[in-house]
Image (tube, rainbow, N blue to C red):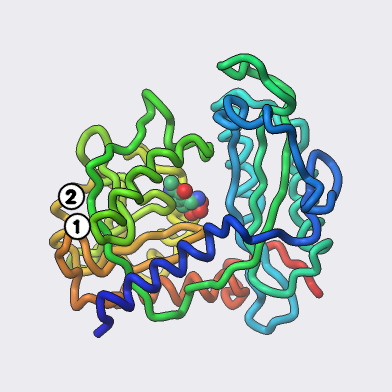
């Protein structure tokens, strides 16, 4: 059985792989139509502040194929589509079409000569120095595609301690969680800080109806009596592509999957609980609010999903080849 210390260590390494303030950068990033040296992609200090409140982004992963001879960008078009959806809701007009942004992502991978798992972050923000406090609709936007390598946790023994947060998930009538906006992450950030202060790894946020919504960077599901249950897309969650992928894979594995409102105490009675997201991949939750989930290690359904997800992203699931954009070396 995994010890609590090891579990926390695993969760911290996810954190480290995602948050690297001093990471430097790759050689190139894509900025508003062209590749520019990463170190020269600067903006004026006055462009930060109110303008960044409106910024939206995507997090995409490209995995090395199982045979090591190509990179496979996972669900690229679906991620880019969600970037346009986010921009539409916050009234930003992206000056590039989906085809151009797809090409930009592929260009960034090629220019940096990646031969390992890489995380890609396209994002859009109001350009220039905006004087007004409220960034108006339809201002000129810049689009950037940044990238960095990461260490996948798929197929490894891991788990995390989660706790229900005292912070409520932002909601549709204030800051729609469906939008992948940097601003929305302030909510998850406060919850994460609280969780860490109390000795847990990650928070689970309840929505304004006190039902389970999601984690700060991933959706959540539980398994009870063999049935997989996850909050619906109107529970105050991001419309996660990993969630959708996971539900598809779980159904293919023969599991019943239910999308509905979830009570906090259902987490306490669950046989398995796991997070799912591009960054966190499939992350078993082995403790909730100090209660051990199952035997304190990843359960069978979670492990099977982790394996199926790993196979899909590394190109070992022929039936899901359409999820992948291949970049041969
Ligand atoms: N919810 C939140 C708040 C997130 O930040 C993420 C990560 N993008 C997810 C869910 C998972 O979304 P996806 O599977 O599309 O990465």
Identity of the residue drawn at 27% across and 82% down:
2
Secondary structure under tag 1 reads: helix
Question: Which disc is residue 85 wearing?
Answer: none
Q: Marks 1 and 2, how far apart in space? A: 6 Å
Q: Residue at x 35, y 38 (%)?
A: 236
Name the residue located 61 percent from the left edge and 58 percent from the top edge.
22
Tag 1 residue = 267
Residue 85 lies left or right of residue 223; in this view the side is: right
Crowding at mark 2 (Cα within 10 Å: few <14, some 14-19, many 20+):
some
Where residue 87 sits in the image (x, y, percent)? Answer: 61, 31
Query: Which residue is at 23% across, 50% downward?
Result: 164
Query: Does 38 appear above or below 134?
Result: below
- Circle 1 crowding by C-alpha within 10 Å: few under 14, some 14–19, many from 20: many
Asked if residue 56 lies left or right of residue 277, the reply is: right
Contact (CB < 8 A) between labels 1 and 2?
A: yes
Q: Position of residue 97 (x, y in %)?
A: 76, 37
Secondary-structure class at tag 2 = helix
The N terminus, quarter of image: bottom left
Q: Quadrant of residue 168?
A: top left
Q: Nearer the viewer, residue 81 or 168?
A: 168
């Amino acid at each position: 059985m995994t010890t609590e210390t090891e579990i926390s260590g695993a969760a911290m390494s996810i954190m480290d792989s995602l948050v690297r303030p001093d990471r430097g950068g790759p050689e190139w990033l894509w900025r508003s139509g062209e590749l520019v040296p990463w170190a020269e992609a600067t903006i004026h200090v006055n462009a930060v502040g109110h303008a960044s409140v409106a910024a939206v982004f995507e997090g995409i992963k490209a995995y090395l194929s199982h045979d090591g001879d190509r990179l496979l960008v996972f669900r690229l078009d679906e991620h880019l589509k969600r970037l346009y959806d986010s921009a539409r809701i916050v009234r930003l007009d992206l000056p590039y079409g989906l085809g151009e942004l797809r090409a930009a992502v592929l260009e960034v991978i090629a220019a940096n000569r990646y031969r390992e798992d890489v995380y890609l972050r396209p994002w859009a923000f109001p350009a220039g120095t905006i004087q007004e406090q409220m960034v108006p609709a339809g201002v000129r936007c810049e689009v950037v595609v940044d990238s960095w390598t990461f260490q996948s946790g798929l197929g490894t023994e891991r788990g995390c301690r989660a706790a229900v947060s005292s912070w409520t998930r932002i909601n549709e009538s204030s800051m729609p969680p469906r939008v992948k906006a940097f601003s929305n992450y302030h909510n998850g950030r406060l919850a994460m800080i609280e969780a860490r202060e109390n000795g847990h790894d990650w928070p689970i946020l309840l929505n304004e109806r006190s039902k389970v919504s999601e984690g700060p960077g991933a959706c959540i599901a539980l398994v009870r009596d063999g049935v997989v249950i996850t909050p619906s897309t109107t529970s105050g969650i991001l419309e996660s592509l990993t969630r959708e992928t996971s539900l598809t894979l779980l159904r293919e594995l023969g599991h019943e999957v239910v999308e509905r409102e979830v009570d906090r105490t259902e987490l306490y009675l669950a046989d398995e609980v796991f997070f799912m997201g591009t960054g966190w991949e499939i992350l078993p939750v082995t403790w909730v609010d100090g209660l051990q989930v199952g035997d304190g290690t990843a359960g069978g359904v979670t492990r099977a999903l982790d394996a199926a997800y790993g196979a899909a992203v590394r190109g070992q699931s022929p039936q899901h080849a359409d999820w992948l954009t291949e970049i041969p070396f």
